[in-house]
């Protein structure tokens, strides 16, 4: 195998007594002896410091529709170059990408690309954005930031799909470079986060508030509903009340269907009716843009004008079926300025998913 320069220094750590070092990237605060790796697997002790061991390496690249991230209000219809690495700083028992996020094998990181090349490839392939997805960019933030800098030089946007489990200082550094973010708000109880994800709810809420109040990044939120675990009316009503009070009515919110995976194979898939019920609860709480995902639901997939109720963006899965916004992103029916990052004309990428061999380009 060809040698790669895939290990780079990191900043968020400090030394402890007894020769250990503590990672300060996320509230897990892994304390590592010589040669140990953190729970995320990709940050490790080397020479008395903590380094990132997967810089420039990926589990694969693919061109997706931006709606798949999911982002409904950020450059609709455009293609996005998606990639992830390995590992994760959460331990969700239901992980839908467990083969990537729980990977402990560097052989799974078969593709590699330096940030400058990624940006150039995205531009050459007609992608408007690059998305850090499949696993969480928090754990490879040095690579993500360098890539974002290279992208901005070429007018390419960067998208972070994240659980938002990150400490304050690295949070501010990472997201200052990102153009759009989708945060997984996995539930609205400490018990769920502790037992199912080995994490803490408050850190995610802090990340959401920071993104909403202190950055210019476009923000959307996703909640995967798991039958019997986070889908009760009470929890959904409390979550919706928090969203309306803290995010305001215009942050798009996606409710997605769970399918049995990894360590939760004994839990049934989410019925479509559960997603519709959650959408109704969120809209009654005042949220204007609420969507259903992982099921076919053209009504729950489409965008409606908060001013007059007219359908302004029709969708069927990842295909745009109707477009009733003018060149300024205003509703053609009533002139209301629909919230989002829109251009004069929408993209037409559709539902295509195209794997990319970066090494061949």
Image: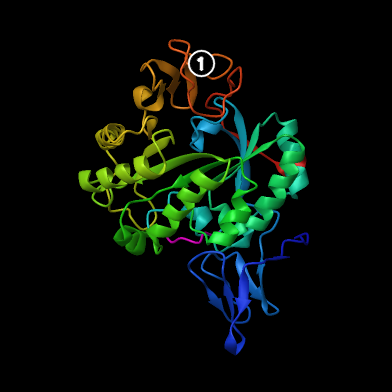
Question: Which segment did they paint magenta?
Answer: 87-92
Write the residue at 63% across / 48% down. Answer: 176
Above or below 359: residue 87: below
| Residue 287 place in picture, x, y as percent | 35, 33
- Taking the image as shown, residue 87 lies to the left or right of residue 185, namely right
In the rendered image, which quarter is residue 66 located in?
top right
Question: The C terminus appears in which quarter of the rendering?
Answer: top right
Looking at the picture, tell me which residue is in the foreground, 108 or 68. 68
Q: Residue at x 43, y 12 (%)?
A: 334
What colouring style does the render use? rainbow
Direction from residue 238 to residue 39 in the image, left or right = right
Q: x, y (%) of residue 162?
A: 51, 49
Compared to residue 236, the image places residue 102 above or below, namely below
Asked if the stretch drawn in magenta spans residue 130, the answer is: no
Q: x%, y% of residue 114?
A: 75, 50
Residue 339 percent location from the top left of the image: 49, 28
Q: Residue at x 76, y 36 (%)?
A: 154
Decide if residue 163 is on the left or right side of residue 6.
left
Q: Nearer the viewer, residue 132 or 304?
A: 304
91 in magenta: yes
Main secondary-structure element of the magenta-colored stretch: loop
Which residue position is annotated with label 1? 325
Left or right of 56? Residue 269 is left
Taking the image as drawn, is residue 85 in sight? no
Q: Eyeballing the image, is 17 above or below 303?
A: below
In terms of image quadrants, where is residue 302?
A: top left
């Amino acid at each position: 195998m060809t040698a790669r320069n895939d290990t780079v220094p990191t900043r968020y750590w400090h030394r402890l007594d007894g020769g250990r070092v503590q990672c300060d990237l996320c509230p897990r605060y892994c304390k590592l002896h010589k040669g140990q790796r953190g729970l995320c697997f990709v940050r490790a002790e080397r020479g008395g410091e903590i380094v990132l061991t997967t810089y420039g390496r990926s589990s694969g690249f693919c061109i997706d529709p931006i709606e798949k991230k999911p982002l409904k209000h950020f450059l609709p219809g455009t293609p996005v170059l998606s990639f992830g690495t390995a590992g994760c700083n959460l331990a969700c028992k239901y992980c839908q990408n467990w083969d990537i996020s729980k990977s402990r094998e560097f052989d799974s990181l078969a593709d590699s690309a330096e940030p400058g090349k990624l940006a150039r490839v995205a531009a050459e392939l007609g992608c408007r954005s690059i998305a850090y997805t499949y696993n969480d960019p928090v754990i490879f933030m040095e690579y993500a930031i360098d890539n974002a800098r290279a992208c901005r030089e070429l007018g390419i946007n960067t998208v972070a799909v994240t659980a938002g489990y990150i400490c304050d200082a690295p949070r501010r550094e990472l997201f200052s470079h990102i153009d759009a973010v989708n945060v997984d708000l996995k539930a609205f109880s400490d018990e769920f986060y502790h037992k199912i994800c080995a994490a803490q709810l408050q850190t995610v809420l802090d990340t959401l508030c920071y993104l909403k109040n202190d950055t210019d990044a476009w923000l959307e939120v996703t909640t995967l509903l798991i039958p019997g675990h986070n889908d009760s009316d009470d929890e959904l009503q409390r979550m919706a009340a928090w969203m309306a009070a803290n995010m305001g009515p215009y942050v798009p919110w996606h409710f997605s269907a769970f399918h049995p995976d990894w360590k939760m194979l004994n839990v049934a898939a989410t019925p479509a009716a559960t997603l519709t019920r959650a959408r109704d609860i969120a809209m009654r709480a005042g949220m204007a843009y609420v969507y259903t995902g992982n099921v076919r639901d053209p009504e729950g997939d489409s965008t409606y004008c908060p001013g007059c109720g007219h359908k302004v963006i029709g969708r069927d899965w990842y295909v745009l079926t109707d477009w009733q916004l003018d060149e300024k992103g205003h509703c053609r029916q009533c002139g209301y300025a629909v919230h989002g990052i829109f251009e004069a004309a929408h993209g037409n990428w559709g539902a295509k998913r195209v794997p990319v061999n970066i090494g061949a380009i």
